[in-house]
Amino acid sequence: MRRTAPGAVCPVRTTLNVLGGKWKLLILSYLLTGPQRYGELRRLMPEVTEKMLIQELRELEADAIVERIVYQQVPPKVEYQLTEHGRRVQPMFAELITWGQGYRDRDRKLEDAA
């Protein structure tokens, strides 16, 4: 097996650096359905702390995966949506969902057999 030289660019490492983290994939899965307000994301993910959600959103924004849209109104309204580049994760999510369902079904079959 060929090993990647230190400092060489590894596509898997790049993907993990951008999309890795406990909450980023879940955030992206909700944004695939369309723009979401911060409060909606908080309700969809009650187990994530406010600090962590803000941090993950900021990192996704810094990596140009998510854009933050601020509407000048009272009260202020902020939405998050995927950028064009961020929308390119959609085929990957289809595969992740298929894999996750298969894995979950495998666990059910093992439980039924026990």
Image (spheres, grey):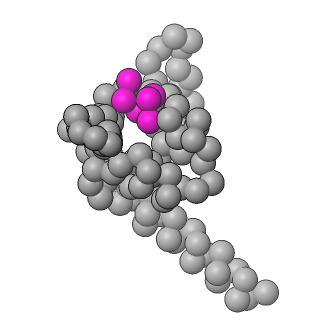
Task: Give the residue at x 48% y 63%.
Answer: 99
Along the line of sight, the residue nearer the viewer: 22 or 105: 22
| Residue 105: quarter of image | bottom right
Measuring from the top left, give residue 29's x and y in whole percent: 40, 54
Q: Which residues are magenta?
A: 57-62
User: In the picture, residue 58 is in which quadrant?
Assistant: top left
Q: Position of residue 110 (x, y in %)?
A: 70, 80
Q: Where's the N terminus, which quadrant?
A: top right
Magenta stretch secondary structure, dominant:
helix
Give me the residue at 50% from left, 35% from top: 54
Q: Residue at horizontal 79%, vertical 87%?
A: 114
x then y, percent, for residue 87 = 26, 45
Res. 59 in view: yes
Side of 23 where 65 appears, left or right: left
Question: Which residue is most to the top?
Answer: 7
Left/right of residue 60 with respect to residue 17 in the rendered view = left
Q: Is residue 59 above or below residue 28?
A: above
